Amino acid sequence: MTSEGPHNLPGAPPLLRTIESAVAKVWLYENVVITEVEQGVKINYKNTFDLLVKGVNYIDYKPWVYISHRIHPYEIDPKFFKYINLIPFLKGVAIVYPGGFDASLPLIEKEAIKRKVAVFDDLGEAYLWAQELLKKPKK
Protein backbone atom coordinates (compact mmCIF):
# COMPACT_ATOMS: atom_id res chain seq x y z
CA MET A 1 0.00 0.00 0.00
CA THR A 2 1.49 3.32 -1.06
CA SER A 3 0.38 6.91 -1.22
CA GLU A 4 1.80 10.23 -2.30
CA GLY A 5 2.75 11.15 1.26
CA PRO A 6 2.41 14.49 3.03
CA HIS A 7 5.27 16.39 1.39
CA ASN A 8 3.95 17.33 -2.09
CA LEU A 9 7.27 16.41 -3.68
CA PRO A 10 7.96 17.03 -7.38
CA GLY A 11 6.78 14.10 -9.44
CA ALA A 12 4.64 12.80 -6.54
CA PRO A 13 6.79 9.79 -5.61
CA PRO A 14 4.95 7.06 -3.72
CA LEU A 15 5.33 6.96 0.03
CA LEU A 16 6.52 3.45 0.85
CA ARG A 17 6.49 3.52 4.64
CA THR A 18 6.22 5.78 7.68
CA ILE A 19 8.03 5.22 10.97
CA GLU A 20 7.18 7.23 14.09
CA SER A 21 8.81 7.47 17.50
CA ALA A 22 9.01 9.95 20.37
CA VAL A 23 12.11 11.38 18.66
CA ALA A 24 11.01 11.81 15.05
CA LYS A 25 8.73 10.98 12.16
CA VAL A 26 10.36 9.29 9.19
CA TRP A 27 8.94 8.95 5.69
CA LEU A 28 10.53 6.44 3.32
CA TYR A 29 10.12 7.19 -0.36
CA GLU A 30 11.96 5.30 -3.07
CA ASN A 31 15.65 6.10 -2.45
CA VAL A 32 14.82 9.14 -0.27
CA VAL A 33 14.23 9.31 3.47
CA ILE A 34 12.70 12.44 4.99
CA THR A 35 12.88 12.99 8.74
CA GLU A 36 11.21 15.57 10.94
CA VAL A 37 12.63 15.56 14.46
CA GLU A 38 10.37 16.56 17.34
CA GLN A 39 10.99 19.96 18.92
CA GLY A 40 13.59 20.18 21.68
CA VAL A 41 15.00 16.67 21.21
CA LYS A 42 18.75 16.05 21.45
CA ILE A 43 19.64 13.56 18.73
CA ASN A 44 22.19 10.93 19.71
CA TYR A 45 23.00 7.34 18.90
CA LYS A 46 21.07 5.97 21.87
CA ASN A 47 17.71 7.61 21.14
CA THR A 48 17.85 7.07 17.36
CA PHE A 49 19.33 3.57 17.09
CA ASP A 50 15.92 1.93 16.65
CA LEU A 51 14.93 4.40 13.91
CA LEU A 52 18.27 3.94 12.12
CA VAL A 53 17.99 0.15 12.13
CA LYS A 54 14.36 0.15 10.92
CA GLY A 55 15.10 2.65 8.16
CA VAL A 56 18.31 1.08 6.92
CA ASN A 57 16.76 -2.42 6.96
CA TYR A 58 13.80 -1.20 4.94
CA ILE A 59 15.94 0.62 2.37
CA ASP A 60 18.06 -2.50 1.86
CA TYR A 61 21.10 -2.37 -0.42
CA LYS A 62 20.39 0.52 -2.76
CA PRO A 63 21.69 4.10 -2.93
CA TRP A 64 19.62 6.64 -1.03
CA VAL A 65 19.62 10.24 0.21
CA TYR A 66 18.62 11.50 3.65
CA ILE A 67 16.66 14.76 3.94
CA SER A 68 16.46 16.43 7.34
CA HIS A 69 13.35 18.62 7.23
CA ARG A 70 14.04 20.96 10.14
CA ILE A 71 10.64 22.37 10.95
CA HIS A 72 11.45 22.33 14.71
CA PRO A 73 14.60 23.31 16.59
CA TYR A 74 16.60 20.46 18.12
CA GLU A 75 20.17 19.55 19.05
CA ILE A 76 22.52 16.93 17.64
CA ASP A 77 25.29 15.27 19.62
CA PRO A 78 28.36 15.72 17.34
CA LYS A 79 29.43 12.12 18.10
CA PHE A 80 26.28 10.98 16.28
CA PHE A 81 27.82 11.78 12.90
CA LYS A 82 30.35 8.96 13.11
CA TYR A 83 27.40 6.54 12.92
CA ILE A 84 25.90 8.38 9.95
CA ASN A 85 29.20 7.92 8.12
CA LEU A 86 28.97 4.14 8.63
CA ILE A 87 25.61 3.78 6.87
CA PRO A 88 26.13 1.91 3.61
CA PHE A 89 24.73 3.27 0.36
CA LEU A 90 24.01 6.73 1.81
CA LYS A 91 24.91 9.08 -1.05
CA GLY A 92 24.11 12.42 0.52
CA VAL A 93 22.37 14.52 3.13
CA ALA A 94 20.09 17.47 2.44
CA ILE A 95 19.21 19.82 5.27
CA VAL A 96 16.07 21.89 4.82
CA TYR A 97 15.44 25.02 6.87
CA PRO A 98 11.96 26.16 5.73
CA GLY A 99 12.50 29.65 7.19
CA GLY A 100 15.96 29.93 5.64
CA PHE A 101 19.39 29.25 7.10
CA ASP A 102 21.72 31.94 8.41
CA ALA A 103 24.85 31.24 6.34
CA SER A 104 27.00 33.06 8.92
CA LEU A 105 26.34 30.22 11.40
CA PRO A 106 28.58 27.16 11.34
CA LEU A 107 26.99 23.97 10.04
CA ILE A 108 28.71 21.02 11.68
CA GLU A 109 27.16 18.54 9.23
CA LYS A 110 29.26 19.89 6.36
CA GLU A 111 32.44 19.07 8.27
CA ALA A 112 31.32 15.90 10.05
CA ILE A 113 29.47 13.98 7.32
CA LYS A 114 31.66 12.27 4.75
CA ARG A 115 29.03 12.41 2.00
CA LYS A 116 27.61 15.20 -0.13
CA VAL A 117 25.79 17.72 2.09
CA ALA A 118 23.59 20.56 0.85
CA VAL A 119 21.36 23.11 2.57
CA PHE A 120 17.99 24.25 1.23
CA ASP A 121 15.05 26.38 2.31
CA ASP A 122 12.56 24.35 0.26
CA LEU A 123 11.81 20.64 0.62
CA GLY A 124 10.98 20.27 -3.08
CA GLU A 125 14.38 21.68 -4.06
CA ALA A 126 16.09 19.27 -1.67
CA TYR A 127 14.18 16.37 -3.21
CA LEU A 128 15.20 17.40 -6.74
CA TRP A 129 18.85 17.66 -5.58
CA ALA A 130 18.55 14.17 -4.09
CA GLN A 131 17.22 12.78 -7.37
CA GLU A 132 20.11 14.35 -9.31
CA LEU A 133 22.64 13.01 -6.79
CA LEU A 134 21.16 9.51 -7.11
CA LYS A 135 21.63 9.63 -10.91
CA LYS A 136 25.37 10.26 -10.59
CA PRO A 137 27.57 7.18 -10.84
CA LYS A 138 29.50 6.13 -7.76
CA LYS A 139 33.08 7.38 -7.79
Image: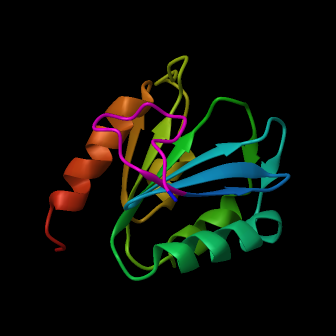
Q: Look at the magenta stretch and give its main secondary structure.
A: loop
Q: Nearer the viewer, residue 14 or 37?
A: 14
The image quadrant that residue 51 belongs to is bottom right
Could you tell whether 89 is left or right of 2 in the image?
A: left
Could you tell whether 72 is left or right of 139 in the image?
A: right
Q: Is residue 31 magenta?
A: no
* Residue placed furthest toward the top: 99
Could you tell whether 87 is left or right of 127 in the image?
A: right
> At x 55% / y 17%, what residue is drawn?
99
Q: Position of residue 102 (x, y in %)?
A: 52, 21
Q: Position of residue 70 (x, y in %)?
A: 61, 34
Could you tell whether 94 is left or right of 43 in the image?
A: left
> At x 49% / y 54%, what residue is drawn?
2
The residue range painted magenta reads: 2-16
In this rendering, the answer to whether 89 lies above or below 134 is below
* Residue placed furthest toward the front: 1
The image quadrant that residue 139 belongs to is bottom left
Q: Position of residue 133 (x, y in %)?
A: 24, 54
